[in-house]
Image: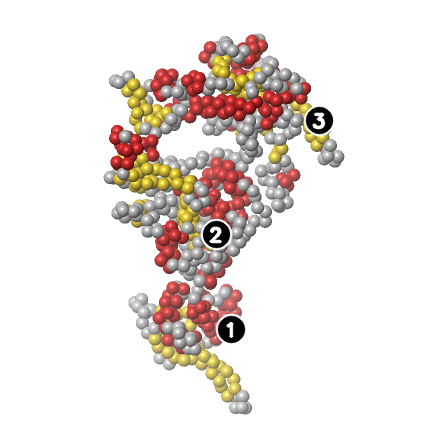
């Protein structure tokens, strides 16, 4: 043996785990039905239950009591379009990550959107098929625990989590578990938890999280299972491993059986002996009384909870069931620092507010703050309650989706916390939906979403989603934004924009205005100003107006494709997208988008923006100019403007010139001589508002003043034979003329043709 050569081959994570669990080549298999593609007939085929993936993680095969594999569509499949992944179905497996791959304490990966299914050990499956009697069936968390327990004689199934005991569709206990109970005439069901179920999370204490949540999860899991089994006339027991009484403190059933090698039969007998607590397990009968579990988990009284966890908590402040407490060593008692109810209130200056949820017209709950009288609060909660309400100097609006702060320099942040967390995963439905909305501007659409998420203070253009048809996805997009940014986004109607009391909009990140058809010029200007304003005068009923930082992005949704708003070519704030009807409607799309939010955020976190900050609204003006926007501009022009544009354009093409100068009188006399109802003042206003590139002549000092100019016209010239020819002549004029340039009226092709045949201009006689 060489000097540096190891004595033993180091086992992989998979190899070590399989060895501990007693998994061998012989027992690591299950016969399942597969379908022959040629004949369509089913036949049995042997599959490994545990396999190692390329990263060293462990894949756990999940199957049904009918010996069928759970299969689901490939995440990248597109049934409505040809795709190589359409025929690539996935087999449902739970992945136990290699310890080096674990992030955020997430050890297991379950296929998203495919429900949860119990792991049924082969021995239990065989008993079900033979309808053998099972007196006591255990339910525990994890396939490894179920496998190890079944290997040594326990009748047991494994749940993927203590909360994964229900069928997603029916809300009942998993149907396969019910089938086992009925077919095998089960008398007792043990809900078996790990030995740390009584422990408190030190991390939760340090992070100021509610310490009641962990024990309440175990309580709710056990009692809900008891309720779901009530009609099946079985006894239900809560149980957990007695970790403290065993050397090495095993946490789960698998750990206990590994440590107690050679005594596995005694361990299983202890588990199935229900009337008394044994050496390895605590058991509580919940069949007729679940109150004993409340007391056992130490969540019946705050004093009991603190006494049990006193060594960890000490004199630190802690949150329990929403209320913040602290142990007072002088009084030797638990004192309230902040009642749960008081956290719904706050005082800014002299005014008290209550935070509450209110449904909007879509049924979505939105967070609102309402002014409350001090006397009303005291009537509801008692006079001593007021002292617990936090007090702040003023309001601020500071959007942040990563490092959010509710209180900033003793000011109350009216922007709501971001409720989602970034996690790796599949977001194919989301990307497909965004591609549907933005089409050829897909990357810009992703930039828009990324800027909302990562740079919420950045100004963005007014996004207008328009379509004549219904069910195109524009309202779904607004609802998705609402799901993504929760209380920081809202969907409203025109009336709410007109309302002078705007406090409910002042701290929003996104304001979507549905079914927009805005006729009033003042409202149009208000929306445009909101899109670019740095501050907003916040006004509440009966209160003084207060300026607050304002970062809202406006989204307009309308079935009026061309006239939902009046816009000019200079209105660079608008980004208009014409939305088509999708080829195939996806059922429950919003639910799928909601499930993919963590994965979409992870996608955005890893993505590089495709555009740079070109303007105040980020995107370059030319990049957001779409054909849909040009149609809006064209439709919004008064007939007077359309006539002027048509006539001036004809002059360029007819006379081959690049510039035309006309006074207001020239325009009226030349283009509207037969329509006496059109007044010069109306023509002037129309040019000013709808033709912003057309300016009056200015001298070298930048002042509007009279100018000598000439207007071309056709004149008849006899040729001496009794016939006539027409040639261009010039009428010399003087006045305050508008300057019309060919570049603002003609296409590039027309201008090129114009330059090739441009006529020389005569020298003016002055």
Q: Which residue, given by chain and number where applicable, does mark 1 sit on?
A: 757
Q: Position of residue 552 (x, y in %)?
A: 38, 47
The residue at 40%/53% (across/down) is 494
In the image, 511 versus 402, the foreground residue is 511
**Which element is circle 2 on?**
strand
Q: Position of 192 compared to 211: left or right? A: right
Marker disc for residue 285: none
Q: CA distance from mark 3 to mark 2?
A: 54 Å
The total of numbered circles placed on residues is 3
Q: Which residue, given by chain and number where applicable, does mark 3 sit on?
A: 44
Task: Say which label, 1 or 2, has the lower sequence index.
Answer: 2
Q: Which residue, given by chain and number where applicable, does mark 2 sit on?
A: 465
Task: Say which label, 3 or 2, has the lower sequence index.
Answer: 3
How packed is label 1: few (under 14 Cα within 10 Å), some, or many (20 or more)? few
The residue at 37%/73% (across/down) is 679
How packed is label 3: few (under 14 Cα within 10 Å), some, or many (20 or more)? few
Q: CA distance from mark 3 to mark 1?
A: 83 Å
Q: Is residue 527 visible?
A: yes
Q: Position of residue 15 (x, y in %)?
A: 59, 20
The residue at 49%/86% (across/down) is 717
Q: Is residue 408 visible?
A: no
């Amino acid at each position: 043996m060489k000097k540096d050569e190891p004595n033993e081959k180091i086992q992989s994570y998979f190899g070590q785990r399989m060895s501990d669990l007693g998994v061998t080549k012989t027992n690591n298999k299950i016969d399942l039905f597969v379908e022959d593609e040629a004949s369509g007939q089913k036949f049995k085929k042997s599959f490994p239950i545990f396999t190692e993936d390329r990263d060293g993680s462990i894949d756990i095969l999940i199957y049904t009591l009918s010996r069928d594999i759970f299969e689901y569509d490939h995440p990248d499949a597109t049934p409505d379009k040809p795709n190589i992944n359409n025929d690539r179905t996935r087999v449902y497996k739970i992945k136990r990550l290699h310890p080096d791959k674990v992030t955020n304490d997430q050890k297991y990966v379950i296929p998203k959107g495919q429900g949860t299914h119990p792991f049924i050990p082969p021995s239990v499956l065989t008993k079900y098929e033979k309808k053998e009697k099972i007196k006591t069936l255990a339910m525990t968390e994890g396939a490894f625990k179920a496998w190890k327990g079944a290997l040594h004689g326990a009748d047991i199934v494994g749940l993927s989590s203590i909360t994964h005991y229900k069928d997603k569709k029916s809300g009942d206990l998993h149907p396969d578990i019910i089938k086992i109970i009925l077919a095998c005439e089960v008398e007792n069901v043990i809900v078996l938890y790990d030995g740390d179920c009584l422990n408190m999370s030190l991390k939760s204490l340090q992070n100021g999280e509610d310490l009641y949540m962990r024990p309440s999860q175990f309580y709710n899991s056990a009692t809900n299972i008891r309720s779901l089994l009530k009609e099946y006339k079985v006894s239900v027991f809560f149980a957990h491993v007695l970790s403290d009484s065993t050397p090495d403190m095993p946490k789960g059933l698998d750990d206990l059986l590994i440590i107690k090698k050679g005594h596995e039969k005694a361990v299983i007998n202890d588990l199935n002996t229900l009337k008394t607590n044994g050496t390895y397990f605590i058991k509580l009968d919940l069949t007729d009384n679940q109150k004993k579990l409340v007391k056992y988990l130490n969540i019946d009284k705050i004093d009991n909870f603190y006494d049990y966890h006193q060594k960890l908590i000490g004199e630190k402040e802690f949150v329990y069931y929403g209320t913040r407490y602290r142990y007072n060593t002088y009084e030797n008692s638990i004192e309230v620092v902040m009642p749960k109810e008081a956290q719904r209130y706050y005082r800014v200056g002299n005014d008290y507010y209550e935070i509450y949820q209110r449904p909007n017209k879509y049924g979505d709950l939105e967070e609102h703050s309402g002014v409350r009288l001090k006397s009303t609060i005291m009537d509801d909660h008692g006079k001593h309650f007021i002292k617990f309400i936090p007090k702040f100097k003023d309001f601020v609006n500071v959007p942040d989706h990563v490092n959010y702060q509710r209180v900033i320099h003793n000011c109350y942040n009216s922007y709501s916390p971001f409720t989602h967390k970034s996690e790796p995963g599949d977001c194919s439905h989301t990307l497909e939906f965004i591609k549907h909305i933005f089409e050829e501007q897909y990357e810009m659409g992703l930039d828009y979403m990324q800027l909302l998420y990562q740079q919420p203070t950045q100004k963005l253009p007014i996004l207008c989603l328009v379509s004549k048809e219904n069910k195109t996805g524009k309202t779904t997009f607004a609802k998705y934004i609402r799901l993504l940014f929760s209380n920081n986004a809202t969907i409203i109607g025109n009336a709410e924009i007109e309302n002078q009391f705007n406090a409910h909009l002042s701290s929003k990140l996104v304001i979507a205005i549905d079914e927009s058809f805005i006729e009033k010029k003042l409202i149009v200007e208000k929306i445009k100003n909101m899109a670019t304003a740095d501050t907003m005068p916040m006004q509440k009923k009966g209160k003084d107006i207060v300026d607050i930082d304002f970062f809202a992005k406006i989204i307009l949704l309308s079935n009026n494709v061309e006239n939902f708003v009046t816009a000019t070519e200079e209105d660079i704030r608008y980004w208009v997208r014409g939305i088509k009807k999708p080829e195939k409607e996806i059922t429950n799309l919003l639910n799928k988008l909601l499930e993919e939010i963590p994965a979409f955020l992870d996608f955005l976190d890893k993505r590089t923006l495709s555009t740079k900050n070109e303007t105040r609204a980020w995107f370059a003006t030319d990049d957001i100019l779409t054909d849909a926007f040009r149609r809006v501009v064209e439709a919004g022009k008064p007939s007077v403007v359309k006539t002027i544009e048509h006539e001036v354009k004809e002059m360029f093409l007819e006379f081959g010139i690049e510039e035309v100068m006309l006074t207001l009188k020239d325009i009226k006399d030349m283009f509207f001589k037969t329509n006496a109802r059109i007044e010069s003042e109306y023509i002037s206003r129309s040019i000013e508002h709808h033709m912003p590139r057309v300016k009056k002549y200015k001298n070298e000092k930048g002042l509007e003043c009279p100018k000598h100019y000439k207007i071309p016209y056709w004149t008849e010239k006899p040729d001496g034979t009794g016939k006539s020819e027409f040639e261009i002549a010039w009428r010399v004029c003087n006045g305050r003329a508008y300057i019309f340039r060919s570049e603002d009226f003609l296409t590039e092709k027309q201008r090129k043709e114009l330059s090739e045949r441009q006529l020389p201009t005569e020298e003016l006689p002055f």
